[in-house]
């Protein structure tokens, strides 16, 4: 890993739940897991597509019950992120996934936020929190949760859109994003991971998305590539995630080098590092091993992450 300051902009905090912590929290909360031991759990981590991963991801988060559980998971990520060279992290969480299983909004948000509040002092990592809405659940539910987040002054900087992409286009969430904009929140959205390039265009034009999570399928649409390059739209790319979820066959087939060559504003992120074989440092190491990125290219990736972050200008200047 190079020593340049790096920001992680595409990270689902629930995707940092490591197998060991799943067992620890199950024990703490007297939950019977459907796995005998760590090996049996780890044997589940073979994915055929996004949905096969999401099934396990939502099932495993059932061990998160108390504020302390959410705080412990978040602290473990921050410690590992600092070791990976991350100096700033913009962290998504999935409130609806917790509400749906009877965990209150206060419990999940306060638990994560309490760990984030200590992060700069404890780990030297500045942070922001983003509430992501599940696109395979009704937009009315997202609106209701957004209203509650705003009413309770939850410490979020913005909103995102995640979960099963195909068949759930951004166009269904226009009202949610409009309400977030009116409330002064920043807007990002997953698009072009498994879904078509048109979802990226919709996220930009209909939702006002300021960053696109993944976005790799833009490469199938020349006009879109030209637009993304001209506007320097940030694309938070997650190479190991794409390999593990089979959106690309192998890392050697990943479009990141081609995206860089086209002048796109790409950066490297870990998405759900506990599930996909590594944190940002491992992503970068494997990319470098596969593509032989030059110091110049690595510096560009790192600088893109800092300039694409929702940082105060003071903090950005301190990091650049
Ligand atoms: N939720 C957690 N990880 C995700 C991903 N890679 N794509 C969509 N939704 C997600
Ligand atoms: Zn993601």
Image (spheres, rainbow, N blue to C red):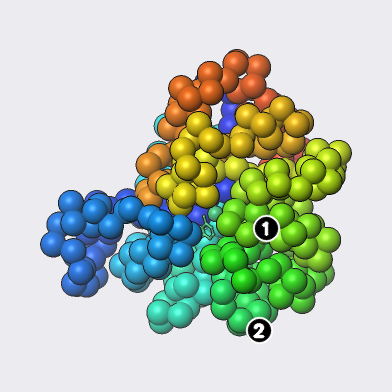
Instruction: Tell me the residue at 37%/42% (across/down).
Output: 277
The tag earlier along the polypeptide, 2 or 1, is 2
Q: Which mark is residue 114?
A: none
Q: Which is closer to the viewer, label 2 or label 1?
A: 1
In the foreground, 207 or 218 = 218
Position of 133 relative to 140 (above/below): above
Question: Quick one: SS at disc 1?
Answer: loop
**Badge 1 density bin: few <14, some 14–19, many ≥20, Cα 10 Å:** some
> Going 52% across and 49% down the picture, which residue do you hit?
247
Residue nearest the viewer, comparing 100 with 124: 100
| 3D distance between C-alphas at marks 2 and 1 | 24 Å
Residue 166: percent from the left, percent from the top? 60, 66
Q: Please tell me whether mark 2 sits on a helix, a strand or a loop.
A: helix
For residue 101, above or below residue 28? below
Q: Nearer the viewer, residue 158 or 228?
A: 228
Residue 240: image x %, image y %?
Answer: 47, 41
Q: Are marks 2 and 1 in contact (CB under 8 Å)?
A: no
Q: Residues within 10 Å of mark 2 (few under 14, many from 20)?
A: few
Residue 238, position in %: x, y? 54, 43
Q: From where the camera sits, is residue 34 visible? A: yes
The disc label shown at residue 140, or none: 2
Q: Residue at x 47, y 72 (%)?
A: 97
Q: Does the rendering let one see residue 183?
A: no
x and y percentages locating residue 207 in the rendered image? 78, 65
Work out which quarter of the rendered image holds the C terminus and state it. Answer: top right
Quarter residue 26 falls in: bottom left
Q: Is residue 20 above or below residue 182?
A: above
Query: Residue drawn 45% across and 80% down?
Result: 100
Query: In the displayed image of the protein, which residue is found farthest to the top?
Result: 295
The residue wearing badge 1 is 196
């Amino acid at each position: 890993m190079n020593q340049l300051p790096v920001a992680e902009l595409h990270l689902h905090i629930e995707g940092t739940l490591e197998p060991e912590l799943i067992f620890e929290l199950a024990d703490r909360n007297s939950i019977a897991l459907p796995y005998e031991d760590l090996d049996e759990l780890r044997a589940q981590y073979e994915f055929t597509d996004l949905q096969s991963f999401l099934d396990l991801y939502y099932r495993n988060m059932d061990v998160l019950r108390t504020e302390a559980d959410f705080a412990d998971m978040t602290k473990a990520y921050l410690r590992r992120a600092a070791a990976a060279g991350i100096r700033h992290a913009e962290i998504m969480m999935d409130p609806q996934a917790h509400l749906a299983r009877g965990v209150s909004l206060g419990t999940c948000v306060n638990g994560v936020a309490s760990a984030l509040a200590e992060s700069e002092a404890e780990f030297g990592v500045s942070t922001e929190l983003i509430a992501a809405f599940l696109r395979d659940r009704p937009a009315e539910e997202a609106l209701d949760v957004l209203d509650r987040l705003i009413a309770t002054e939850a410490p979020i900087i913005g909103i995102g859109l995640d979960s099963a992409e195909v068949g759930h286009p951004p166009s269904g969430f226009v009202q949610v994003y409009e309400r977030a904009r009116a409330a002064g929140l920043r807007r990002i959205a997953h698009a072009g991971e498994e879904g078509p390039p048109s979802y990226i265009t919709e996220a930009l034009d209909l939702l006002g998305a300021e960053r696109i999570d993944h976005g790799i399928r833009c490469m199938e649409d020349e006009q879109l590539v030209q637009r993304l390059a001209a506007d320097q739209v940030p694309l938070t790319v997650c190479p190991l995630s794409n390999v593990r979820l089979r959106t690309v066959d192998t890392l050697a087939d990943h479009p990141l080098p081609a995206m860089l060559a086209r002048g796109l504003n790409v950066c490297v992120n870990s998405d759900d590092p506990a599930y996909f074989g590594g944190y940002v440092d491992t992503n970068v190491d494997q990319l470098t091993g596969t593509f032989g990125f030059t110091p110049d290219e690595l510096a560009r990736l790192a600088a893109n992450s800092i300039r694409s972050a929702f940082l105060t200008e003071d903090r950005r200047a301190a990091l650049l």
